[in-house]
Image: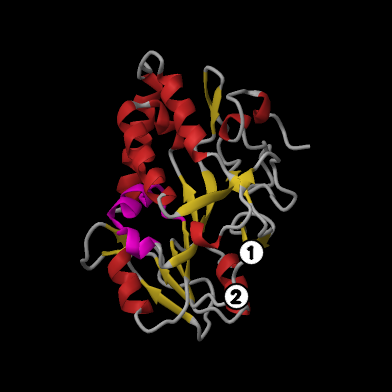
Amino acid sequence: MMKAFETFAERGLMRLRSYKIPKRHDLALRDFMRRLAPVQSETPLIRIGDGGDGGYLVPDDLDGIGACFSPGVAETAAFEAAMLARGVPCFLADHSVEAPPFADPLIDFEKKFIGLRNDAVHMRLGDWTEAKAARIAGDLVLQMDIEGAEYEVLLDASDALLRRFRIIVVEFHHLDWLLHPAGFRLLDAAFAKLQRSFALVHIHPNNCTAPVRYKDFALPPVMEFTFHRSDRLRGARPATTFPHALDRPNLTHLPDFALPKCWYGEGSEEGAGRNG
């Protein structure tokens, strides 16, 4: 299923790159980024996980977290290992692997994809969370990397379910779909839903793919977004410094680049230069 989705996504991206972008689409993009603009608060960001791929910046607000839900299992599980070291149980799910990369009494693994239905291969985020966290006190953390299925999963989730999570970290894929009207509507709806209850506190581009450029915009196709539930936010103000001191390239063998300034300031290509 995931391989089929990736093939569909690749074909969709090929069509996107040959698609004539509507006139004045830059106005829609600029409005989208203005609404999405990240903030910084009195709660500092810390790095959880390794120094490369698998490590993420999250608010230093993990006290009292009851569990971590991590759909999408890679060859390493550095983020989950760091949460386990804090005594936080971790629930993992992925149909494409047989087991997590390591065993731990606090790990619960489901060999299923997170999706829009419950069957032998898939399960819905809400049903999974309800089944596993019904007796867990405290807020939860969601760290999700599911190769492009994140949009449908987020739109399928209820607001009440999402508010169970204090912190949500998602690696979003196919962000250059923002240049296509249908892709724009899908992505806009998913981010708008998150922002009803959460503030965006960090963005980090994955350097696996160079940004796609359109006018004065630069759109990295894959980026990591960190959201902090709004009721936990204190002293929020616009974030203006990227990269963060704790950011690291996902892939050390490829050139790295900073978050393009259009994502946190006026639309400009200036922010798409190399990290210093």
Local crowd at mark 1 within 10 Å, few (<14), some, or many (≥20)?
some
Identify the residue at horizontal 54%, vertical 78% (top origin). Answer: 88
User: Which numbered dot is residue 128?
Assistant: none
Q: Position of residue 2 (x, y in %)?
A: 34, 52
Which SS does the magenta portion mostly show?
helix
Give the answer, above or below, for where 4 lies relative to 209: below
Of residues 25 and 19, the one drawn nearer to the viewer in this rendering:
25
- In the displayed structure, does residue 134 sit left or right of residue 108? left
- In the displayed structure, does residue 154 sit left or right of residue 53? left
Whole-number angstrom distance, CA of label 2 to CA of label 1: 14 Å
Give the answer, above or below, for where 153 lies relative to 39: below
Residue 156 lies within the magenta run: yes
Q: Which residue is mark 2?
A: 63
Residue 99 lies within the magenta run: no
In this orientation, does residue 15 appear? yes
- Farthest residue toward the right? 276
Q: Position of residue 253 (x, y in %)?
A: 68, 44
Q: Quadrant of residue 177?
A: top left
Considering the numbered disc 1 on the image, is that residue within a helix, a strand or a loop?
strand
- Farthest residue toward the front? 235
Kind of residue indicated by mark 2: Asp
User: Which numbered dot is residue 48?
Assistant: 1
Identify the residue at horizontal 43%, vertical 38% (top origin). Answer: 174
Q: Position of residue 60 (x, y in %)?
A: 65, 65
**Segment tinted magenta in the rendering:** 145-162
Give the answer, above or below, for where 64 lies relative to 225: below
| Nearer the camera: disc 2 or disc 1 | 2
